[in-house]
Amino acid sequence: MIRWLKIAGFVAAIMAAVPFSVHAQDIRGIVVDQTGLPLPGTTVELHNGETIVATTSTRGDGTFAFDAGLRGATITAALEGFGTSVLSTAGAARIVLQIAHAAETTSVVAPAFVQESPTTATLGAHLTAQTLARLPSNRLKAKESLPLLPSVIRGADGLLRVGGARPYETPLLVDGFNVSDPATGISNINLPFESLRGVEVLRDPMSVAYGGLVGGLMQLDSKPGGDQFKMGAQGFIPRPRFTTPGFGRLEGIFPRVHVGGPAAQGRIRYFASVEYDFERIPVPGVTQGTGPDIVEQSATVFGRADIQVSTRQALTIEALAFPASTRSAGLSPRRDALATVNNRSVDLFAGVTDRVVFNGANVLTVRAGVVAHETTLVPNGTGTASLSPAGWRGNWYAAIARRAVRYSVTAAWDRTRVTRRGTHTLTIGGSVAARRMSGSLTENAVSVENAEGRVVRTIDFGDGSSIRARDARLGAWVRDVWRASDRVEVDGGVRIDGNSGIDDTAPSVRTGIRYALDASQLTVLKAGAGSFVGTLPLAVQAFAGYPNRLDRSFDSESGSMTRELRLQPAVEALWLPHAVAASVQIEHQFSADLDAQVGVTARRSDRLATLHVPVEGGLMPVRSNGRSTYRELLVSVRRTWNNEQQLFLSYVRSAARGELNDFVALFQTLDAPLLRPGGMSRTSADARNRWIAWGTANFPRRIVVSPVVEVRSGFPYSVLDQRYGYFDRPNDSEFPIFMTMDLVAYKTVTVKKRSADVGIQLFNATNHFNPRDVYAVAGAPRYGDFTNSVGPILRGFLMLKW
């Protein structure tokens, strides 16, 4: 208890050490159009009653600011060709203007996203690039900062979950393009925060323009080039390790360069970034001196060009390459070096967005893109993969090579109409996507031993096989955003999705309302409900091509065989996953710099692809009969000050249940060594209680300090018997409470008009025991022992700016 009080006192001391001027805050915000793009040149007025206190115009990036000494209750934003927006200063952080008339002088920029829903949460759903740059980050990448948001949690496998959904149920979008792997629905693509305007998480329910999802989505909003040439460089100094194990060794190097600016008299704006990452990751209890380690390497090449074709048409062309490799993946105290795998992958993406504004407030947006993912898994050992209560040794269980590609085209037509009963923005859209996957799979025999070293179970596989799948997906939607008044907005729509590979078509309906309880809009009620139609990764349809399995059990004393199961992979009738969700939240602005929200969410999913493992052997089919449920209570508070300073606190109480044998989660890497009968249980990343606190504060002498604290319930795990079957109810035990405190502190120095941020990053500063593995075989010598906790990590921090 005393230790927790000390930790709390330390956090409070850091948060309280904000400069003395915190009582004064500039009124800042950004003005965007209905697609989320910035609107430069917008006239913004600060009002105190009927009096105009001050007037300004938005900059090239759509942002504006009023001096902290000015006080007003409301903000008015107006731009030719758009409707005027009037709202309280509390809601001025992001102002959305609807297109009302396409004037001859209207200039457009190709959009990143579809029109935001008025029911989308404004607190705890978005991180700007400026905020990301000030917070602790292992590799200074944007996506890895998403767990700072209350609805996002990183599972034990390193993958992100949004609102209790499994990773494949929440696709990753880059500028509106789905860049998830068509084979698994998961993406490892990441971008440094210099390449982004921000990251965002959209929760259910949301606009019907988004399809192919069940639980939510993650968005990376890339940065267009600016009005002036800019460049920067970071990470060119190698990073030694200052903690054990591996003290003194080169831990990593992450050089990257970005450049952006105008061309062709400003008609073209470009941005490009290149990065190489190398990191040697020591494993507690395994790495001694020079190894073994997990070694990760990757490169990111990203480019974007925004072309102003005319005053009414804009074109965005972008491309991304992300080759990566991991040596000795899976190395841990429960997996020796020979039982690891070397993983190599390449992600490629290219997209074109064309936007045209016509007379009569008509906007046509067309996107065309292609995503390709290639993966190769090569085991480091040979022969049989052995599994005992102590863990894996000898070999990895499979060798895999696969490639998947998706081609997609989306078109949306928007029209805004002003009536006596308010403004309606109608959207009609459609999409088509073609996917295909091919590859090979060779599985190695698995031998399971008891604590005495006797073989009690073996799994043998048929010959290696080729796996293939292909399909086409169609989608169409109609949506209306009705702004009845300054206080009431309604978002409703219907869509239909179909898939040729499984011959299924399913409709969905979503609606939401935003209602300001008072004229000043200090208190806003947001509620929504809707249905969702997900997508099936291609690995599901390809399962019938997997090798057969021969699963034998043996008596631990005599060695005689007690059971033999012959399992033949099969695919039965499949349907598109379906979910129904509802949410209610209240947002309240206590003052211009203090706001809070309380919300509840409930979701029920069915038709999930689930593997049926027969207890007597025979066909082992994947079926669309899986279910899952999620419940959540969210409370969050944000306090802001001038110059990007803020404090964010949140608490989430949740419960997530789902199928043990959810196919995509089970075959995350396209294979699984051991299979067991399924059923419902807590999901693997179900953290019942989670607290997050983070902040960023400016100190004298241009010093910035930003701490992050996370405390949550431990993830569930299953107790197993000597044959690695379930000993008790699955996922009925828990890891210890997880707690971490991370910190970044840096000073900005300027030499000859060139600036650099120099400082340190400290992870797990309190050295809290956060195990990632457990010895879970009942009756074994180390049963119940937790291991593989990473201690404090101290790293240097350097960013150069031009």
Image: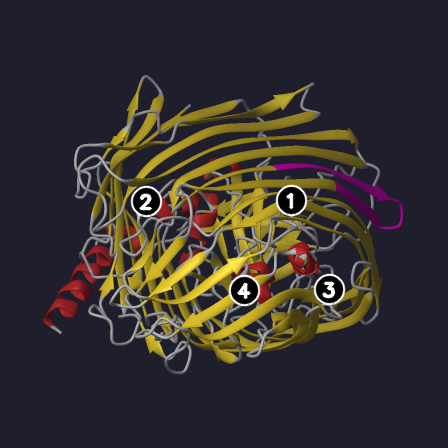
Residue 35 left/right relative to 666? right
Discs 4, 2 touching: Cβ within 8 Å: no
Residue 42 left/right relative to 107? left
In the depicted structure, whether residue 60 falls above or below residue 147? above
In the depicted structure, whether residue 237 falls above or below residue 642? above
Disc 3 target residue: 208
Q: Is residue 358 magenta?
A: yes
**Callout 4: SS:** strand
Give the residue type that dot 4 points to: Leu
Disc 1 target residue: 439
**Callout 1: SS:** strand
Marks 2 and 3, the one that precedes in the sequence: 3
The alpha-carbon separation of the residues under discs 1 and 3 comes to: 34 Å
Disc 2 target residue: 337
Marks 4 and 3, the one that precedes in the sequence: 3
Residue for point 73% across, 47% down: 436
Secondary structure of the magenta portion, mostly?
Answer: strand
Q: Position of residue 560 (x, y in %)?
A: 40, 73
Viewport quadrant of the C terminus: top left
The residue segment tinted magenta is 348-368
